[in-house]
Amino acid sequence: MTTTKHTTLHQHLQQFAQLSEEDLRLGDSFWTVRSIAKHEYFNFQHSVCRQVGFILKGIFRVYYIDPRTEQEHNLYFIPEYAFLTSLKSLLTKTTCPYLIEALEDAELLVIDYDHLQQLYAQSHGWERFGRLLAEQYFMVNQTRSESLLTQSAEERYMDLLTNQPGIMNRVSLGHISSYLGIKGPSLSRIRAQIAQK
């Protein structure tokens, strides 16, 4: 791990879980660099996720394929400086129903689940990291579910732009439409209406 990557990870771990210098030192040897080319996968559908990644560069989409229609449905876009995993698969060691694809050439620092378990046993700080990671994933999932139930496509689009301002330059309109749960022409109409306001 280079000093810059190491420092970036440390800063985010301290912000995210208030890890101490000792906690960070305990974990250092477990984080390894993983490069993922554009359109390659962090994890595959129907495989067990065994790692947590910290995205240094690139953006990922989480999606599933409807087995009846073979249509793709985008659930999330996850950019730099976020933790990436399939939490249910990681914790239960069951297969993941969706895929996590790099939409750009990406670089991550990753840690294996077994190493995280070692850290949890050694440090309350790392246990806090695990709890906060689970809470964050719960909140993201609940917020997403609620947005699909209670918001219009235009409101979901505005939220996406607010929360990830540069996303239109990085993600295709087709993927954005899928995330919003609408067809391409509807997205064009929403964009035109917003431009007129």
Image (tube, rainbow, N blue to C red):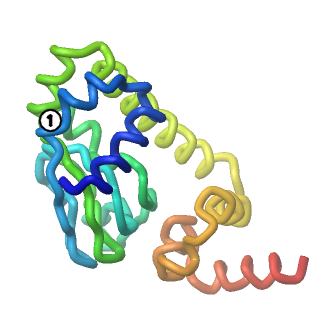
Q: Is residue 161 above or below residue 84?
A: below
Q: Residue at x 57, y 65 (%)?
A: 180
Give the side of residue 173 with respect to residue 47, left or right.
right
Give the side of residue 6 with respect to residue 50, left or right.
right
Badge 1 element:
helix
Which quadrant of the view contains residue 106?
bottom left
> What x and y, as percent, mark residue 175?
46, 75
Which quadrant of the view contains residue 127?
top left
Q: Residue at x 22, y 56 (%)?
A: 2
Q: Amino acid at mark 1?
A: Tyr
> What x and y, as percent, mark residue 63?
35, 62
> What x and y, as percent, mark residue 101?
28, 67
> What x and y, as percent, mark residue 93?
12, 35
Q: Residue at x 71, y 63 (%)?
A: 158
Q: Is residue 35 above or below residue 175?
A: above
In the image shown, does 68 or 61 lie closer to the viewer? Answer: 61
Q: In the displayed image of the protein, which residue is found farthest to the right?
A: 197
Which residue does the numbered mark 1 point to in the structure image?
113
Q: Residue at x 18, y 38 (%)?
A: 28
Give the side of residue 150 with respect to residue 37, left or right.
right
Q: Is residue 94 visible?
A: no
Q: In the displayed image of the protein, which residue is found farthest to the front?
A: 3
Q: Is residue 1 visible?
A: yes
Q: Is residue 123 above or below residue 169?
A: above
Q: Quadrant of the C terminus?
A: bottom right
